[in-house]
Image: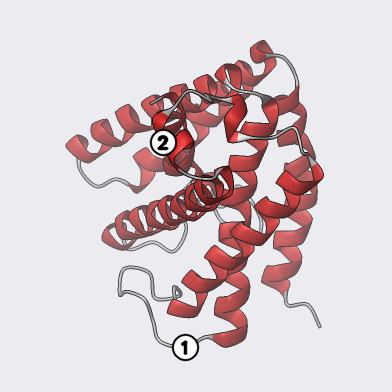
Amino acid sequence: MINKELRNRLLSSIIIIPITLFFIIKSSFYFFIFLTIFFLLVSFEWIKMSKTFLIRVIGILYLFLATYLIYLLRISFPLEIFLMILIICIFTDIGGYTFGKIFKGPKLTKISPKKTYSGVIGSFVFSLIATIIFIKNFSFISFSSIDTSSELINSFRLEEISIFFILFISLISQAGDLIISYFKRLAKIKDTGNLLPGHGGLLDRVDGIIFAMPISYILLIL
C-alpha cells in the first residue's frame, strides 16, 4: 500500500518533470524565463526561512549566481550533458530516499534526522547506475566531446573520469541537501514551503541541484 507522502510525491513528479523537461529542451529564451521564475520562487522561500538580514542577502546572492551558472551550463554544453547532470541529482535524491526507507540504520547527522548512512550509499548507487544507463543508451555523450586535449582526460580512461564525475556530483548534491537542511533546522521548520504536495517547498526539491549544477559547470569549463 503506497503511503500518502509517497503518493503525493509521485503525483507531483508526474506533473513537474514533463514541464521542466519542456523548458530545458526548448530554446535558451524559454529556459531563461523558466529560470527567472525558478529564481523568484526559491528566493521567496529562502527569505521566509532566513532569520537574519545578512543570511537573506548572502542566500539571495548565491541563488542568483547558481541560477546564472545553471543557465550557462545549459547553453554552453550539449543538451545531453545537462540532462546527465540532472539525472545524477534526481537519482541521488531517489536513491537516498529509497535506501533510507528500506534499510534505515544509523543516522548520518543531527542536521537532518532522516538522513542515514544507508541513504548515502543508495544515493551513490542509484545515481551511478541511472547515469551509466543513460550514457550507454546515448552513445554520443562523451567527455571527450568536451575537451579531448585536456591533460586530465588524456591521463585517464574516459570511463574512470565519468565514474569519478558522477560520484563527485552526487556527493555535492547530497552536501547541498544537508546545507539547506541545516538552515531549515536553524529556522525550526520541516519544509521550506508547501508549493509541491508530498515534497514541501521548491527549495526542498532543488537543494542538491543548486549546488551540483554550478559545480558541474565550473568543472567542465576548467
Marks 1/2: CA–CA distance: 38 Å
Q: Which residue is mark 1?
A: 105
Image quadrant containing the C terminus: top left
Residue 104 lies, with reference to residue 113, above or below; the image says below
The crowd level at tag 2 (other Cα within 10 Å; few <14, some 14-19, many 20+) is few
Q: What residue do we see at 57% from left, 86% from top? A: 103
Image quadrant containing the N terminus: bottom right
Residue 44 in sight in this render: no
Q: Does residue 102 appear left or right of residue 117 in this picture?
A: right
- Identify the element where label 2 is drawn: helix
Q: Nearer the viewer, residue 74 or 113?
A: 74
Q: What residue do we see at 59% from left, 77% from top? A: 99
Residue 183 lies, with reference to residue 148, above or below; the image says below
Q: Does residue 154 appear left or right of residue 53 in this picture?
A: right
Amino acid type, residue under disc 2 in the picture = Leu
Furthest residue toward top: 29
Residue 12 on image: x %, y %: 73, 52
Residue 36 on image: x %, y %: 54, 21
Q: Does residue 57 appear left or right of residue 14 in this picture?
A: left
- Identify the element where label 1 is drawn: loop
Furthest residue toward front: 155
The crowd level at tag 1 (other Cα within 10 Å; few <14, some 14-19, many 20+) is some
Residue 143 on image: x %, y %: 58, 34
Q: Which residue is mark 2?
A: 152
Query: Nearer the viewer's eye, disc 1 or disc 2?
Result: 2
Q: What residue do we see at 55% from left, 30% from top? A: 38
Residue 58 lies, with reference to residue 162, above or below; the image says above
Residue 169 on image: x %, y %: 47, 48
